[in-house]
Image (spheres, coloured by chain):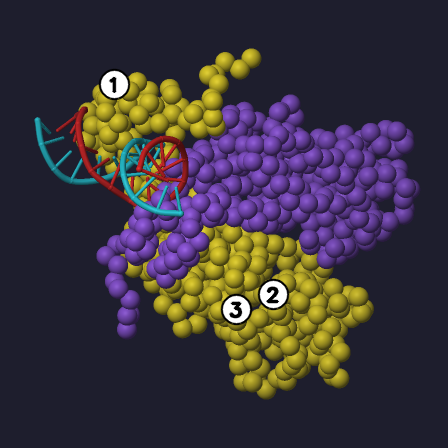
Chain colours: A yellow, B purple, C cyan, D red
DNA sequence: CTGTTAGCGCTTTCAC
DNA sequence: GTGAAAGCGCTAACAG
């Protein structure tokens, strides 16, 4: 039934460079050269052909682990995300993976769950595994030190979440501009009383969005109803909690709410629906990120678009550049507002 | 400005076992033993303490690559997903990662995008990197061969998507039961004319769901309006396409539609809304998976719950078991129906 | 209890 | 153009 030789242990099945060399009647190093695209030339055409033939006849598969030990490169790039359940990060990962793929690199992904200890642990694991580089999507203020120190060992780029006062290269969005867009949109619709459901302060995106938003509120003389807390993590439940808090604490409700990300907006939406407060008739709602599902909510969510895919691509390119020894330059992308059904004129 | 010693190359900064040994005045192998939790005992308490002290004074970090070369274990488990954008898979990954973490393993994640060539490539990369095991969430019929052959090298478990006629261990759900649940639910609500928006045939989940659904349709004497095509991939756009197809081809519309997953249901919902066909008033809609956002759609989606987190956990445990040499036994979880607003009595 | 001796599979000088 | 030899950092016999 099974005609192949039975391997005694799991790995005996794997053919090594030596096996190929022996069968091809050449020295292992010749095989190594023949198979290294950067050294095709140094091997006689005919020997190379023979070697390649033997190699795939035997089903030779190079051992990246051994190669990594010698060369220091493992062909692996680590990606640290805060929460894979946030559909905003998956396009970033897509973007990174797609870019890396073209260079034969494979991503290794881990989740920090916005927990500092976990983050430190993950970096340790990744460095232990000698990833060639790391893209951190999950940076929080408290993680700056470990990230910077890890970057002495392998290049690190920050994507999607910036960090203040750091020298680490970043690919991010202009969050202040995003906050301003949200406020300007609402102001243009005639809203005078507005509120923000804030994300955690130690994820630099959020204070920046808040600042941008508030700057326009002030400039245009709007009134900002403050919610006396901010989300622990930018998730649905926290959006829910903050929305409830807003409803309970404010005597005079705002006519528009800016949630610092779409997930929180979803939470807010749920609370509003449950209390029969209509969106957008009674209150307008603006989210942030334009996650894939945003347009399919009811009402479709007005939101600030974060070009996550593009951020991922750029971050991938940046890592590739760093690996090639090129210096990096921070990249800041511009946000744009996607107006949908959840906001309307008062 | 920068007070630490400047490394000449990236890796010179990394302390090796030898460095620790030298500084501690012992032989490298002693350090190796002292640091290996499974061999604490074989080293004198006092030496061990000294070694450990020196180790973290120097900031020693074991090199998994070197260890992997020697021991054959890299402490890494590959996860192949079809599409990270499908929020149904992230809980599975969560589950796997959480289970692995307890054993110090790190997942390496790649996306096949439901493309066979890509899948083959990913497996190759992973084996090249000597992952200790692989969890495949993305299995399609065409991938069976490569998966089985890869499993000769590293243990593979299938999770979330079963495969027909294979000996690979699987952690899946009883999809037929799920299809039956959907149909029974609709029948109980008095629906007589129903339709299915089918997922691709080569992902075994879908024909099984279809079969379960149809079996109840037949048994209860309902009428199934057939849609003359099935989705290429189980995504929003395809759900949209099939729903449009259904509307165009059927003279007598069904009163209830069963979408083979929630993403497709979202697509169907969009088409219905756009045509002002009310859900659930005009037509009831049932999805599958109970993805995190399902309850936040409007109307909240009635769906068949897939315990993805649990599937992930079990798959993680199964891999752990296989790595420990234990034989595995297939696991089939039971689905349950979550009744929400998108379905109602005719 | 600890040191010695071999490599794991591959790349990389350095010779020829 | 190819072979020989050394060694990446670590672990695993085997001695002592």
At a point 63% along the width and 58% down the height, the residue shown is A294
**SS of the residue under disc 3:** loop
Asked if the residue at tag 2 contacts the one at tag 3, i.e. Cβ–Cβ closer than 8 Å, the answer is yes
Q: Chain of mark 1?
A: A
Residue A75 can be seen in this image? no
The residue that disc 3 covers is A203
Residue indicated by mark 1: A25
Local crowd size for mark 3, using a 10 Å CA cut-off: few (<14), some (14–19), many (≥20): many
Q: Secondary structure at mark 2?
A: loop
N-terminal of the two: label 3 or label 2?
3
Q: Chain of mark 2?
A: A
Residue at 61% over, 65% down = A234
Q: Residue A346 at what x, y percent from top left?
A: 70, 76
Q: Is residue B269 left or right of residue A318?
A: right
Residue located beneath label 2 in the image: A234
Q: CA distance from mark 3 to mark 2?
A: 9 Å
**Residue toward you, B269 or B46:** B46
Depth order, front residue of A155/B338: A155
Regarding residue A120, the answer to whether it shows in the image is: yes
């Amino acid at each position: 039934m099974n005609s192949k030789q039975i391997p005694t242990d799991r790995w005996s099945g794997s053919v090594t460079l030596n096996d190929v060399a022996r069968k091809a009647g050449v020295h292992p190093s010749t095989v190594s050269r023949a198979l290294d695209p950067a050294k095709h030339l140094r091997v006689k055409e005919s020997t190379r052909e023979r070697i390649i033939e033997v190699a795939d006849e035997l089903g030779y598969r190079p051992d990246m682990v051994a190669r990594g030990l010698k060369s220091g490169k493992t062909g692996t790039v680590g990606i640290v995300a805060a929460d894979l359940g946030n559909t905003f990060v998956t396009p970033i990962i897509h973007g990174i993976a797609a870019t890396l793929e073209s260079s034969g690199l494979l991503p290794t992904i881990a989740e920090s769950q916005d927990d500092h200890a976990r983050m430190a642990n993950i970096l340790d694991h990744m460095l232990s595994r000698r990833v060639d580089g790391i893209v951190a999507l999950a940076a929080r203020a408290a993680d700056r030190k470990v990230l910077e120190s890890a970057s002495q060992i392998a290049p690190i780029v920050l994507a999607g979440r910036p960090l203040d006062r750091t020298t680490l290269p970043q690919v991010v969005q202009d969050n202040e501009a995003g906050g301003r867009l949200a406020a300007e949109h609402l102001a243009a619709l005639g809203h005078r009383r507005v509120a923000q459901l804030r994300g955690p302060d130690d994820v630099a995106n959020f204070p920046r969005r808040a600042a941008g938003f508030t700057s326009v509120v002030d400039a245009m003389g709007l009134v900002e109803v403050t919610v006396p807390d901010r989300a622990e993590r930018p998730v649905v439940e926290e959006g829910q909690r903050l929305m409830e808090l807003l409803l309970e604490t404010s005597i005079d409700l705002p006519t528009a709410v800016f949630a610092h990300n779409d997930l929180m907006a979803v939470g807010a939406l749920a609370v509003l629906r449950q209390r029969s407060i209509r969106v957008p008739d009674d209150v307008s709602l603006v989210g942030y990120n334009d996650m894939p599902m945003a347009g399919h909510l009811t009402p479709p969510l007005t939101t600030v678009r974060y070009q996550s895919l593009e951020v991922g691509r750029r971050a991938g390119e940046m890592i590739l550049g760093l690996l090639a020894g090129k210096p990096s330059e921070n990249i800041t992308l511009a946000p744009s507002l996607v107006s949908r059904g959840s906001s309307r004129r008062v």
